[in-house]
Image (tube, rainbow, N blue to C red):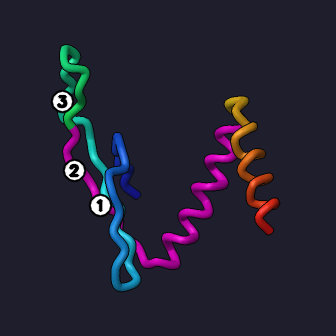
């Protein structure tokens, strides 16, 4: 297995049952102008059902990270909002 490092998620595209996620890396930092130059680095391509599973796992991971950081209030508020819509 190969690790791939990216600095940011850039954009996505969905078409013909496939999801494409484009990522970027930091190319240059201009401290005087307070600007960061990004350039495309990698694209992850997966079938739609695989992406939906991935998205569910990312949502769970986000909740765990927020809990561990002491910022658990955000997920609780989201759950209350979802439950009140039902």
Q: Is residue 62 magenta?
A: yes
Q: Is residue 32 magenta?
A: no
Query: In this rendering, would 65 be left or right of 50?
Result: right
- Residue 79 vertical position relative to residue 37 in the rendered view, above or below: below
- Residue 46 vertical position relative to residue 83 in the rendered view, above or below: below
Are the residues flagged by discs 1 and 2 in contact, CB closer than 8 Å? yes
x and y percentages locating residue 43 in the rendered image = 29, 61
Q: Nearer the viewer, residue 76 or 46?
A: 76
Q: Main secondary structure of the magenta part?
A: helix
For mark 1, what is the residue?
A: 43
Quadrant of image for the N terminus: bottom left
Indicate which disc, 2 or 3, sits on the residue closer to the N terminus.
3
Quadrant of image for the C terminus: bottom right
Are the residues flagged by discs 2 and 3 in contact, CB closer than 8 Å? no
- Residue 57 vertical position relative to residue 6 in the rendered view, above or below: below
Looking at the rendering, the stretch of residues picked out in magenta corresponds to 38-67
For mark 3, what is the residue?
A: 28
Is the residue marked by circle 3 packed among few (<14), some (14-19), or many (20+) residues within 10 Å? few
Distance Cα–Cα, label 1 vs label 2? 8 Å
x and y percentages locating residue 71 in the rendered image = 70, 33
The image quarter containing residue 2 is bottom left
Is the residue marked by circle 1 packed among few (<14), some (14-19), or many (20+) residues within 10 Å? some
**Which type of secondary structure does the marked residue at label 3 adopt?**
strand
Query: In this rendering, would 21 be left or right of 83?
Result: left
For mark 2, what is the residue?
A: 40
The residue lying at 61 percent from left, 60 percent from top is 57
Indicate which disc, 1 or 3, sits on the residue closer to the N terminus.
3
Is the residue marked by circle 2 packed among few (<14), some (14-19), or many (20+) residues within 10 Å? some
x and y percentages locating residue 28 in the rendered image = 18, 29
Distance Cα–Cα, label 2 vs label 3? 13 Å
Query: In this rendering, would 60 be left or right of 48?
Result: right
x and y percentages locating residue 33 in the rendered image = 19, 19
């Amino acid at each position: 297995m190969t690790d791939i490092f990216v600095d940011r998620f850039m954009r996505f595209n969905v078409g013909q049952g496939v999801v494409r996620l484009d990522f970027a890396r930091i190319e240059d930092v201009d401290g005087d102008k307070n600007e960061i130059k990004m350039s495309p680095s990698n694209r992850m391509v997966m079938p739609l059902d695989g992406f939906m599973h991935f998205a569910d796992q990312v949502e769970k991971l986000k909740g765990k990270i927020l809990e561990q950081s002491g910022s658990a209030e955000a997920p609780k508020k989201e759950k209350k909002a979802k439950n009140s819509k039902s």
